[in-house]
Amino acid sequence: MSLHFSKTANLNKIQEVIREGCQPLYGLFNREAVGEILSSAVLENTPYRGGVSKRSLRIRIKPKAEDRGEDLAGIFGLDAEVFGKKYLEAISGDGQEARRIRTLHSSSLLCLLCFYGVSEDRPLVIKIDGRVVKFTSSSFEVKLPVEKEENGESRPANIDIVLAGKDEKRGKPVMLFLESKFSEYLSLGKYEGISNRVYEKTYSQLCKGGYLDRMGLKFEENPENPSYSVLSSTNGRTLHYASGIKQMVSHFLGVKNIAEGEQYKGVDIYLGEILYKFPGAIDKRNLKFQDYRYLYEILAEGLNEISDSKLKVVEQCFTYQEVLKSFNLNPSVRLFYFL
C-alpha cells in the first residue's frame, strides 16, 4: 500500500466517523498533517460489543510474539528503546490496554506520547503550589492500594503517570501523581457502584464540609444494593462528569495510603489532574471543560481540608497545552494533538 493511498484512506476513515458516527471529536484529527503522520499506519473501526464502533478508530496492531509498541514509535518518530520500556508500563493494566491504547482518542496514548521522554536530558518544568519543579523521570499506570470492597475484592486505583523531580530553588525531591483526561470529561452522567466500605467516610466528610453541595452533587446509597452508593446531581439529570470526581477521590485515598511510606520520606507529594482543552467546535465555548475544572477545584479544596497526610492535591487542573508549551516535545506528537 502506498503512503499516499494510506494517508487518503485514513483521512477518509476519520471523516466517515465524523459524518456517520456523529463524532465531532474526530474533527481534531481531520487534518492533512495527521494524515501524513499516520501514513504508515492502517486505521480500523474499534471492536465494540461483538461488532465495531462507528464512533471510534484505532491504529491496527500487527500480530507479533511480543508487543513493545514499535509500530507507534515508528509512526511518531520516537526513541524506540526508551518508548518501548514506557509502553510496557502503560499497558500493564487489565490486559486490554495494548488494544485500547491504539484508539485515536485514547487518554493513555496521549499521556504516553507526551511524557514518555521526560528525563535528565529532556526535563519538564512545571509550576506547582508556587514552586518551580524540574521533573526528570516518568512512570506509567502506577497501581495505588485502596481498601478491600464488601465482596473482599481489592481493586487498586491505577493512576496514569507519576513524575519525579526536584524543587529548582531548594533541591527538595517532589513527586506528582497525575491523572490524564483527553475526551472523557465531554461525557456527562452519574457514577454508580461506589463501595461504601471504601469510600463512605471520605464522601461523608466532603458532604459535611459542604463541598458536595457546592459541586451540585450528592452521594446516596443505592436502594437496590445498600453496600454501594451513587454519585449524581443534587437535582435532575447529572450534567457533570461525576466519574472523574469519583476517580480523583480513589486516587486521593491510594496516594494517601503510600505517602507516609519509607520510600517517600523527605519527598513532597502532590496529586493532580491534566486535561486536554478542546477547541470550541468540539466543546462549545469550553463549557464542559469549565464545568469539570470548577468541580475539580472544589474537590481539591475539600480533600486538602480533610487530609491528615502530607499529600497535597493541586488546587487547579493542569492543561496539556500549558504544561507542554515549552517542553521539548516530539514534533509529530505536537502536530498530531495540535499542541
Image (cartoon, helix red, strand yellow):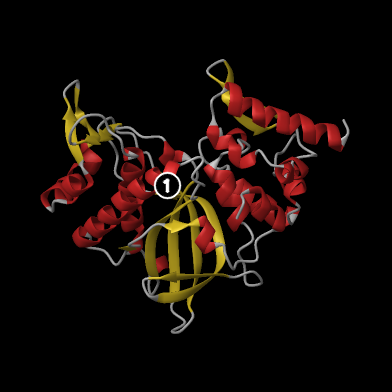
Q: Secondary structure at mark 1?
A: helix
Please name whichever residue, 230 or 261, is drawn nearer the observer in this view of the structure.
Answer: 230
What residue is shown at x 77% (from left), y 43% (from top)? Answer: 36
Q: Which residue is mark 1?
A: 286
* Residue 285 horizontal/vertical position (percent): 42, 46
Residue 22, how many percent across, how many down?
Answer: 53, 25
Image quadrant occupied by the C terminus: bottom right
Give the residue displayed 60% in from the left and 25% down from the top: 19
Q: Amino acid at mark 1?
A: Asn
Q: Residue 68 placed where, x, y %?
A: 70, 44
Residue 137 visible in this rendered orientation of the protein: yes
- Quadrant of residue 287 within the rendered picture: top left
Asked if residue 144 is positioned above or below residue 283 in the image, the reply reads below
40 to 117, vertically: above or below: above
Indicate left or right for 81 with 325 as reference: right
Find residue 5 and report its image quarter: top right
Q: Residue furthest bottom?
A: 169
In screen coordinates, is 170 left or right of 315? right
The residue furthest left is 208
Q: Locate the N terminus by quadrant.
A: top right
* Vertical comparison of 144 with 314: above or below: above
The 10 Å Cα crowd at callout 1, few under 14, some 14 to 19, many 20 or more, is: some
Q: Nearer the viewer, residue 323 or 119?
A: 323
Q: Position of residue 309 (x, y in %)?
A: 26, 64
